[in-house]
Image (spheres, rainbow, N blue to C red):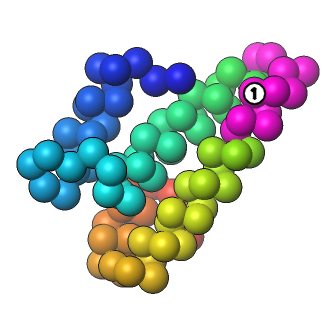
């Protein structure tokens, strides 16, 4: 779980307009940070299966949002992939 400060930093960095909190870009960036944090947790707690399930859920949601963004706005998709250093 991200703290409020961490989430606000991500929103500030990826927002598309002044009061943006729910655009696909912001949602994907937040999910990427949560996936990164859960991955680190699971490396040291290998038998934590409930966290593993949460990680898989977040990865699936991020994948669906990326697919949506690619379909709706390819230019924004490319920029986000490059910024987050994700694979296509």
Q: Is residue 46 visible?
A: no
**Which residue in the rendered view is the most extreme toward the right?**
47
Relative placement, left or right, of 13 versus 38 is left
74 vs 35, left or right, is: left
Nearer-the-camera pick, 5 or 46: 5
Viewer can see residue 73: yes
The single residue placed furthest to the left in the displayed view is 18
- Residue at disc 1, secondary structure: helix
Residue 46 percent coordinates (x, y): 86, 22
Q: Quadrant of residue 55?
A: top right
Tell me where residue 7 appears, x and y as whole percent.
Answer: 34, 30
Find residue 42 and report its image quarter.
Answer: top right
Numbered disc total: 1
Residue 41 to residue 72: above or below: above
Location of residue 70 with respect to 65 vertically, above or below = below
Classify residue 85 by image quadrant. Answer: bottom left
Residue 10, given in percent of the width and then of the height, sits at 31, 37
Frontmost residue, 45 versus 48: 48
Q: Is 17 placed above or below 74 here?
A: above
- Give the residue number, with chain letter if any, for mark 1: 51
Residue displayed at 86% across by 27% down? 49
- The residues colored magenta run 44-55
Indicate yes or no whether the magenta region holds residue 52.
Answer: yes
Residue at position x 33%, y 50% from top?
A: 22
Residue lying at 48% horizontally and 36% vertically, measured from the top left: 33
> Is 37 within the magenta?
no
Q: Position of residue 2 (x, y in %)?
A: 46, 24
């Amino acid at each position: 779980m991200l703290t409020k400060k961490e989430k606000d930093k991500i929103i500030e960095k990826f927002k598309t307009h002044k009061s943006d909190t729910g655009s696909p870009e912001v949602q994907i960036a937040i999910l990427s940070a949560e996936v990164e944090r859960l991955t680190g947790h699971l490396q040291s707690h290998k038998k934590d299966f409930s966290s593993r399930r949460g990680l898989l859920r977040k990865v699936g949601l991020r994948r669906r949002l990326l697919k949506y963004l690619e379909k709706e706005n390819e230019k924004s998709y490319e920029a986000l992939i490059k910024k987050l250093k994700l694979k296509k």
